[in-house]
Amino acid sequence: MNARLTRRRLLLGSAILVPMAAAGQSAWSRVEQAARGQTVYFNAWAGSERVNAYLQWAAGELQRQHDVKLVHVKITDTAEAVRRVRAEKAAGRTDGSVDMVWINGENFLAMKREALLFGPFAETLPSYQYVDTAGKPTTRIDFSEPVDGLEAPWGMAQYTFFADPGRAGTLPTSVAELLDWARRHPGRFTYPRPPQFLGTTFLKQVLVELTADRQSLARPATTEAIAAVTPALWRYLDALHPHLWRQGKQFPASPAAARQMLADGELFIGTAFNPNEAANQIAAKALPAMVVSYQHSAGTIGNTHFLAIPFNARAKQGAQVAINFLLSPAAQARKADIAVWGDPTVLAPGKLSADQRQTFDAAAGVPGAVLKPAPTLPEPHGSWVDPLEREWSRRYGVS
């Protein structure tokens, strides 16, 4: 999409966000005024106590500052919300049950393709001015799919390994080295069972590292492309699985379960999609202080996670106010705090005032922080996820 068309879409989108009002009143102030008293049903993953606690804090601030009630609808998979909105569209419902959703990847792709999203709205938010669109290009590209203002960036992620070096020894810095390490340490590594997102991300990390021509992964998946590039992935997993925990015949159901196995000494290497995960867990005394985080030297998959509004949300103004607050420097700084969540910010430090910059908790040097940050590798196009998960299930989906 060219720049002129993008600007035109954003202007048109902002024009329909709120009705025309008295001259002199800004479009955003009209959004804020309409949002007062609204209840926003926010469908978001609930698999982390610290994330849930952060959202409780945000709900209190939104109620106090804007008279907007944020209700965390706790889900285990974003696909649940996608299916609900899809069903409501099929039934002709304009008063949807989902006002806001935490989303990215294949779920965003599905909602965008099926016209299930409201907007474009993201770049009309006042807090968007602080977003690091230049330094963090995935704030505008979601799994190789242009965002087009249909979702607002919320946090950054990069696939990260963590381990106790005293047990793990020399840490592997590529998937090839990981295979050799697993052979020397049978049963001491595993990954969550796909389609759990961290398990699927491991598949994608292996695929990206083993694929010489990565341009094919940036394009929508085709039968020909899948047949050309995935055999190396399945050969690798065939070689790796006999050396995993329980010989690859069972897999942890969640990242939390796998992390506890490492804390208990059952595993020597764990995985996370938040580079500050281990640091946060050490601060919470859930992992020992000697655990370190690291990334493969040639890079690991990274992306941005987003907030979106369904096309039939009942509280569209309230959802915009909530998202704008969650993008604000104050809310982003609290979210980035290792002791709170440790989710890396989408904001650009250079766009913040000196006082705002001081509110961010630097992760460097914190116990458990990444030893040496590696390059961020782009996600494959979102259309690759489903065929990878289906074929993994066919080959390895044992109970």
Image (cartoon, grey):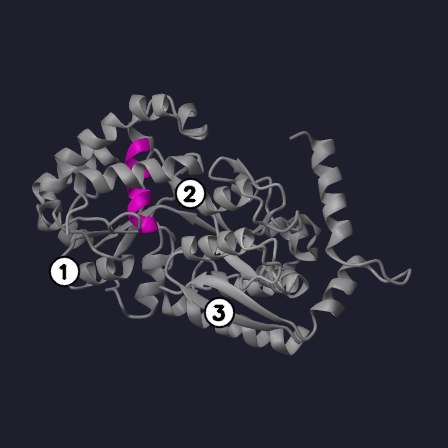
Q: CA distance from mark 2 to mark 1?
A: 28 Å
Mark seen at residue 72? 3
Q: On the picture, is 309 further left or further right than 303?
A: right
Residue holding disc 1: 265
Q: Earlier in the sequence, mark 2 or mark 1?
A: 1
As shown in the figure, which amino acid type bears the numbered disc 2? Answer: Gly
Q: Is residue 199 magenta?
A: yes
Observer-nearest of 267 and 213: 213
Q: On the picture, is 27 further left or further right than 320?
A: right
Q: CA distance from mark 1 to mark 3?
A: 34 Å
Mark seen at residue 302? 2
As shown in the figure, which amino acid type bears the numbered disc 1? Answer: Gly
Q: Is residue 55 visible?
A: yes
- Rate crowding at label 1 as few (under 14), some (14 to 19) or many (20 or more) other CA atoms within 10 Å: few
Q: Earlier in the sequence, mark 3 or mark 2?
A: 3
Disc 3 on helix, strand or loop? strand
Pinpoint residue 55: horizontal percent, then vertical percent.
49, 69
Q: Main secondary structure of the magenta part?
A: helix
Observer-nearest of 306 and 183: 306
Q: Residue at x 65, y 66 (%)?
A: 318
